[in-house]
Image (cartoon, rainbow, N blue to C red):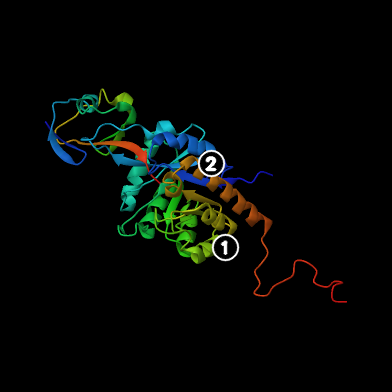
Amino acid sequence: MKIKLNGEMLETDALTIHALVTARNQDPATLVVEHNYTLVRQAAWDHTRLQEGDTIELLSFVGGG
Amino acid sequence: MTDTLTLGNRQFTSRLLTGTGKFASNDLIGPMLAASGSEIITVALRRVDLQAPPRDNILTHIPEHVTLLPNTSGARTAKEAVRIAHIAREAGCGDFIKIEVITDMQYLLPDNHETLKAAETLAKEDFIVLPYVMPDITISRQLYDAGAAAVMPLGSPIGSNRGLEMKSMIQRIIDTSRLPVIVDAGIGRPSQAAEAMEMGADAVLVNTAIATAQDPVQAGKAFSLAVTAGRMAYQAGMAGRSSQARASSPLTGFLQE
């Protein structure tokens, strides 16, 4: 299915946020995930299912002033 | 009586706020915080670069007793700033938020209009709102009415190390504001931090000057001492200036008979 990940449309086989994060080799400890503009806590990644056309943002806290 | 800085419902002993940007190594942040005694530090939220190798988590470098101050950098509208604030709070960063809305990409000067709109929304949602603004008495009053916890006028453009270019306007804000005044951005040297505190600022926020010093830990300590000295001078009530000399030793004496 096609989803929008960090602003780019792409094809993915991942069925959940957890699967998507794993497929993209991201360290869960550093990630903040928005699913259709709603924050999804890490405990819910495994049972948050992705659907065609979803918008996902993978964010993280970084240095800033 | 302890001299504390009150922001929202929280009290702080240190009047030096610091930032996590631009450190050569994030491993320096913990020692800098220990050396400076800073109790509030800013962090930013960014899209992960999916092509780059994973980076370390900045939050692991910040001890628990230090209050996180997520900023809304990257936001160009009030709506975007509010969205970042929601994410930061949901992600467990607490209730403090530095509103930073910038539409001027040449000098990175803040957009007071959008900043005020974001402050109004976030204060209603019980955030402790610290807005970064162009120094202006009107915005300072409007932010008070909006329920902000402080006003943060800039000294000079972000990262410029130019000190208090806006000195006269900052002084007017200090003289009239009912909110704590935190001078943010452009403070490049401890002497400039001391100057802001001598003027009666309640605190200063310093990031670039500490993070990009050759020894950020020593720089953090230097800024901390300067902030304390400036605060003490303000409380002591410094005497005025005079264009005439005023002898500090008796001039009448025995030599000329």
Q: Which corner quadrant holds the N terminus of chain B?
A: top right
For marks 2 and 1, give the CA distance: 28 Å
Q: Residue B36 bears which disc, if any?
A: 2
Residue B142 screen position, x and y as percent: 46, 59
Secondary structure at badge 2 equals helix
Secondary structure at badge 1 equals helix
Q: Residue furthest bottom?
A: B257
Label 2 or label 1, whichever lies nearer to me, is 2
Q: Residue furthest top?
A: A46
Is A41 positioned to the left or the right of B119 in the image? left
Chain to which the residue tagged by mark 1 belongs: B
Q: Residue B175 bears which disc, if any?
A: 1
Residue B75 screen position, x and y as percent: 32, 50
Q: Is residue B127 visible?
A: no
Question: What amino acid is at disc 2?
Answer: Ser
Question: What amino acid is at disc 1?
Answer: Asp
Foreground of the two, B114 or B195? B195
Residue B148 screen position, x and y as percent: 47, 51
Look at the picture and state if B152 lies above or below B6. below
Near mark 2 (Cα within 10 A), the count class, few <14, some 14-19 or many ≥20, is many
Foreground of the two, B146 or B174? B174
Q: Give the quarter of the image for residue B244.
A: bottom right
Is B198 positioned to the left or the right of B57 in the image? right
Residue at x 14% of width, y 33% of height: A52
Chain to which the residue tagged by mark 2 belongs: B
Residue B131 screen position, x and y as percent: 43, 52
Foreground of the two, B109 or B228? B228
Foreground of the two, B33 or B148? B33
Earlier along the polypeptide chain: callout 2 or callout 1?
Answer: 2
